[in-house]
Image: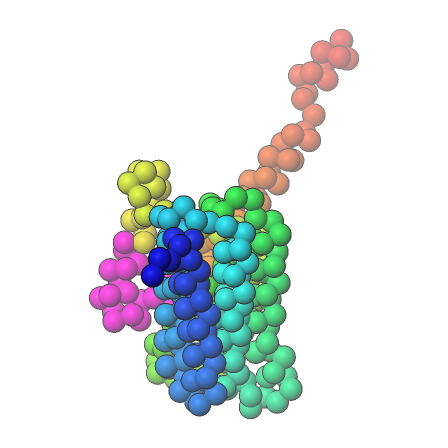
């Protein structure tokens, strides 16, 4: 049976959404680690569909819309339901509201992304990408929740993640996108690829535990770079507003 190459990226996108659905089912059955793993699988399919679209040169507006809808399921609904099932349901209505932040703000972020999208490749994102926010929650749950940290600290940390990550998703903080895996990209962004290589090595060496540290590194790198750029722009604006004393002296003469 002949399958159009345009369908290949969409197939991976659908698998992304399906993994999100399976994550919700496992969360409902209190299989929280399995639910977290399905979000990891969804992230892998999300990365592969973009790569497949580039390789087959089949990027399209339909693919962008389908990808965003799938992301809302896998990186919005699934992690929200996951943290709700783990603890936040014990907070009653407040827990429902807090756990919904990731889903709601992920939907807002992805809608904004689609409206602002020019072309199909972006070097930077406005706001924390939804997959990275979901992976931060997932890697914390898999490797740290009530395993290294105490129960009280784990609970407080989940609440912090549930509030801070959604805010970062809809913020104007710039986050770099992963460059294309090509020789040209390696030459253009050697530091990025070195960091990615180190992250992979650390993750493998620690049995996956280091992935949470990489997520935090990515989050704080965007905050620090944006803060630095803001201070630089403000300093430059103040310098531009300083009158040229020499020019004023010439005019006075």
Q: For the N terminus, which image quadrant?
A: bottom left
Question: Relative to 16, is 224 above or below?
Answer: above
Q: Position of residue 86 (x, y in %)?
A: 47, 85
Which residue is found at the position 62% from the left and 52% from the top?
115
Overall secondary structure of the magenta section: helix
Describe residue 252's horizontal placement relative to residue 139 as left or right: right
Residue at 53%, 55% in the rendered image:
62
Quadrant containing the C terminus in the rendered view:
top right
Looking at the picture, tell me which residue is in the foreground, 239 or 90: 90
Observer-nearest of 244 and 74: 74
Residue 154 picture location, percent across and down = 45, 81
In the image, is residue 57 above or below residue 170? above
In the displayed structure image, the side of residue 3 where residue 85 appears, left or right: right
Q: Is residue 90 left or right of residue 238?
A: left
The residue at the point 24 percent across, 65 percent down is 204
Q: Is residue 165 visible?
A: no
* Residue 65 lies in quadrant: bottom right
Please state the extent of the stretch shown in magenta in the rendering.
197-217
């Amino acid at each position: 049976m002949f399958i159009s190459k345009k369908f290949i990226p969409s197939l991976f996108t659908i698998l992304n959404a399906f993994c999100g659905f399976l994550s919700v089912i496992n969360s409902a059955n209190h299989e929280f680690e399995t639910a977290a793993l399905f979000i990891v699988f969804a992230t892998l399919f999300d990365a592969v569909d973009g790569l497949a679209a580039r390789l087959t040169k089949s990027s399209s507006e339909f693919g962008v819309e389908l990808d965003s809808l799938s992301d809302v399921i896998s990186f919005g609904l699934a992690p929200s339901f996951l943290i709700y099932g783990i603890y936040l349901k014990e907070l009653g209505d407040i827990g429902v509201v807090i756990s919904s932040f990731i889903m709601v703000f992920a939907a807002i972020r992805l809608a904004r992304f689609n409206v602002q999208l020019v072309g199909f490749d972006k070097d930077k994102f406005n706001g924390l990408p939804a997959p990275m926010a979901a992976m931060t929650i997932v890697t914390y749950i898999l490797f740290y929740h009530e395993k290294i940290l105490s129960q009280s600290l784990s609970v407080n940390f989940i609440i912090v993640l549930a509030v801070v990550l959604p805010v970062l998703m809809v913020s104007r903080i710039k986050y770099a996108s992963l460059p294309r895996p090509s020789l040209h990209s390696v030459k253009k962004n050697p530091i990025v690829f070195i960091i990615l290589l180190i992250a992979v090595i650390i993750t493998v060496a620690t049995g996956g535990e280091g992935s949470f540290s990489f997520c935090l590194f990515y989050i704080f790198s965007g905050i620090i770079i944006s803060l630095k750029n803001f201070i630089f722009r403000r300093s430059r604006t103040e310098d531009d507003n300083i009158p040229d004393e020499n020019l004023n002296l010439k005019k006075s003469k």
